[in-house]
Amino acid sequence: MIFLVVMRKDLKLFVRDAKFLATLGLFSASLVLILSVAFGPIFAQPAREAAATVWAALFFAGVLGLTRSLELEGESGAGDALRLSGADPFSLYIGKTLANFALLAAVFLLLLPLTAVFFDVGTLRALPGVLGVAALALIGYSAWGTLFAALARGLQARELLLSVLLFPSLVPLWIGAVKLTHAYWGGAPVDEVKDWVKVMAVMDVLGLALAAWLYEAVQEAAE
Amino acid sequence: MILRAEAVHKRFDDRPVLSGVSITLEPGHVVLLSGANGSGKTTLARIISTLLPPDEGQVTMDDVPVSERRTQVRRAIGFASHAPLLYLALTPVENLEFFARLSGVRDGRRRARALLERFGLGYAADRPIAHFSRGMLQRVVLCRSLLNDPEVLIFDEPYAGLDDAGVAAVNDVLTEGKARGRATLLIAHDKERGEGVITRTVRLANGRAQEAA
Amino acid sequence: MTTEIPVWWSRGARWLWIAAIALVLCSFWLVVRAPVEAIMGPVQKIVYVHVPSAIVTLLAFGVTFAAGIAYLSTKQWIWDAIGAASCEVGLVFATVVMITGPLWARSAWNTWWTWEPRLTTFLILWILYAGYQVIRSSLKSGSKRTISAIMGIVFFANLPVVWKSVEWWRGSLHPKNVTMSPDMRQVLLVGMAAWFVFYLATFERRLRLEWIREARSREGHATADSAFLEARVR
């Protein structure tokens, strides 16, 4: 299973880079902090504001994680060795996507309690629903993000360019994640917004399908 | 296995680097590619090893264009360059085992350790390579290029940063390869170091290749 | 390949430009003469520019999408040139849409901007294809073509989902099948034809630039100097 080998390798590299992990954690926590300060101290619609905050922080912090994983390939030319290994490009992509998913999930699990405490939202009963939404959102985010990060690799200011491509493209995923999280945190009846699950699923499938089609071309796009 | 570049052209933006270069790598031969800095040696090596597509012309393996069976060609090539092509946060064994798994080499860990022993790196096999000296790193690079027991070797400046023992190890690999019918392309600006193993010399100048005596 | 474009091309281009200018002038003349809409007054006439521009934008990005697929399967430089030329022209038309839309909305809905699906989708499109230009211009020759092709494909493939989701997010206000008097419809049709031919003409101009660049680059000249390029384009 090539993709598991690649995922394990990427996770190992993430874990050994304590400085990077610490920076990513602190950066995302400070995003939650400034957003809650901006909305607070008295929250008009805590569920809504909290949902916006947690997803905004995750989207921004995620860009750093995504570019990091491509930098690991670039810094000593390991990406060339990946290509020379003759391994199936889509397996490489899936491996990287899974590793990015795990990294983003870890960030989410850090942000979730922070947001819950700062905005005083969420109950244990709502937790499975929120985690389900997060899974849908993060699958799409890492699927699209891994593809786009590969497009922007080697560019100057790639974090910025990646955000420029990623955020507008993921608007459907973003609306869905915020609406559903908002509902689960008691801001609105879940039934009214449950159709957004379909939109998010479509985005997940579309991202993976585009990568299955195009990732090899991205990988082979050499100078 | 014969790897051949035919009338290869390559330009970067508007700067032509190669304008019609042909070169053949045959089993049992070590071809030294020489030329001034910026003459396109590394570019040619990258094109022959399928990392870079030529603008015009083609690369063939046994007369079949490499683009038609890229995986097979890539798995037959051992490539080492000045850039290590390794993950610096991993240990040599982790690196080699990872690439062995990817290229479908069986029993990767044992092969990795055997290669490291051979290059005198057994003692450092489980340390992250980030703190390795240039010479130690270069030895790991050589190990990686030999993982798949390649039929074609493409070595871009393999002597860089190596001490005498390291140079001897590289020449050992090249001599052994010659005996086993490997086709080798060697790029080195100090060709004295490859004395005795080089069978042909090709010189790159002004985007063209010339057979040198 | 020389910097001289083929004869059929330059001849065709001349007629294309004559047609484009004639049609655009004709369309403007019709717009001026068109009946003034009862409720909105003359502002409604923006529609005759806005709607054709929007359609041409989608068409232009559609061409970039198709050219992207063609490039990836053939690796012929001309597909990349077509995709890039169409994308750049499309961005200009998208900008026209983004300017005329709020002007109209200000008088129709009494607000410059609403989070209306088509407006929002166009904003998203505009950002994405502007990003395309930035990335394309910062890439080196080899990867430039592949990466541009992929962006052209991915952005366009994502478009229906973005559109649908934004529509869902905020029910639609945007006029769809507006009842127009027959003469208004006629003006709009001429406008569409005019802007379409104008798109073809500007696209041809932009494509010619790519042609010259490619030819210069193949001749092995050092970085094509802009003075030379400008002289050739004129």
Image (cartoon, rainbow, N blue to C red):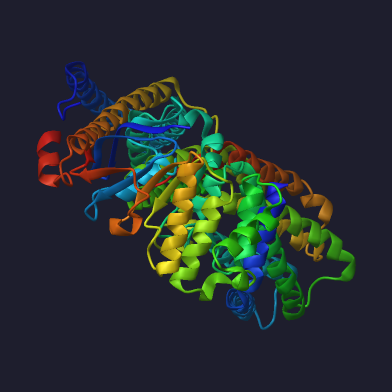
The outermost residue toward the right is: A125
At x 64%, y 63%, the residue is: B93
Residue in front for this viewpoint, C43 or A57: A57
User: Residue C195's image quarter?
Assistant: top left
Measured from the top left, where is residue B201 in percent x and y?
28, 44
Please report the residue visible at 34 percent of the width from the left and 53 percent of the height from the top.
C138
For this rendering, which residue is in front, B127 or C98? B127
Can you tell which quarter of the image residue B72 is in? top right
* Position above or below: A56 against B151: below
Q: Residue furthest top?
A: C8
Q: Position of residue A203 (x, y in %)?
A: 66, 45
Q: Give coordinates of residue A221: x percent, y percent.
A: 44, 44
Q: Is residue C11 above or below residue C205?
A: above
Q: Nearer the viewer, residue A24 or B208?
A: B208
* In the image: residue A103, left or right of residue A83: right
Q: Is residue A88 left or right of residue A132?
A: left
Where does the C terminus of chain B fall, quadrant-wise? top left
Residue C111 in sight here: no
Total labels drawn:
0
Q: Is residue A159 visible?
A: yes
Which is more toward the observer, B173 or C20? B173
> Which residue does the image show at 44% across and 50% down from the upper left?
B174
Q: Position of residue C55 (x, y in %)?
A: 44, 32
